[in-house]
Image (cartoon, rainbow, N blue to C red):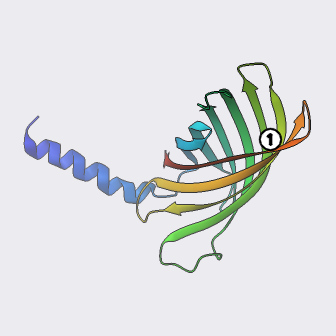
Amino acid sequence: MNKINKSFIIIFLLSSATIWGQHKEFGLGFVAGSPTGISAKYWVNSINAFDFGLGYSFAQNNSNFNFHADYLWHNSEFFHSSEKLLFHYGVGLRIKTVVDGRDSFGARAVAGVSWFPSHTPFEFFVEVAPVFKLIPETALDIDGGLGARFYF
């Protein structure tokens, strides 16, 4: 393939990102934090979305797998900016499997900020989620992370 054809393909793909930008319903990406892993979001309308995460915590004495599912609300009026910044909050559930068998189940309350750069299919986010463990005992835990998603 010559340089002109490669350049044309690159320009086409980059320009098509303006068509994709936040008009898609499903985003898939990565989150780093507690836990670190895969993050997905499915928009059901312009305000609400389902958020899913599957991750692993690398804590030396407390290695574990986490799965969470949240229902989110997004507020575009929280920030006054020319950028598309959304405050999001919601509720959900978390299942945590620990190597030593201290598995747990709990309810999450999540809050964060999402940034959708103009004319791109990306979302960058930061969030924190207190987790109210219900099983095997009641206790408070916290999840949080920084991540990015690509919208298909």
Q: Amino acid at mark 1?
A: Leu
Q: Is residue 138 left or right of residue 124?
A: right
Q: Residue furthest top?
A: 100
146 and 4: which is toward the camera: 146
Establish if 97 lies above or below 118: above
Mark 1 lies on residue: 93
Residue at the location (64% across, 39% down)? 53
100 and 28: which is toward the camera: 100
x, y (%) of residue 86? 60, 66
Residue at the location (87% across, 42% down)? 139
Pointer 1: residues within 10 angstroms few (<14), some, or many (20+)? some
Q: Which part of the image, by quadrant, shows the N terminus? A: top left
Residue at the location (65% across, 75% down)? 78
x, y (%) of residue 85? 55, 68
Establish if 53 lies above or below 11: above
Establish if 2 lies above or below 76: above
x, y (%) of residue 143? 69, 45
Q: Is residue 26 left or right of residue 61?
A: left
7 and 61: which is toward the camera: 61
Q: Which picture quadrant has residue 105?
A: top right
Residue at the location (7% across, 38% down)? 2
User: The residue tagged with tag 1: helix, strand or loop?
Assistant: strand
39 and 2: which is toward the camera: 39
Count up the numbered dots: 1
x, y (%) of residue 46? 65, 62
Q: Is residue 121 left or right of residue 3?
A: right
Q: Residue furthest bottom?
A: 80
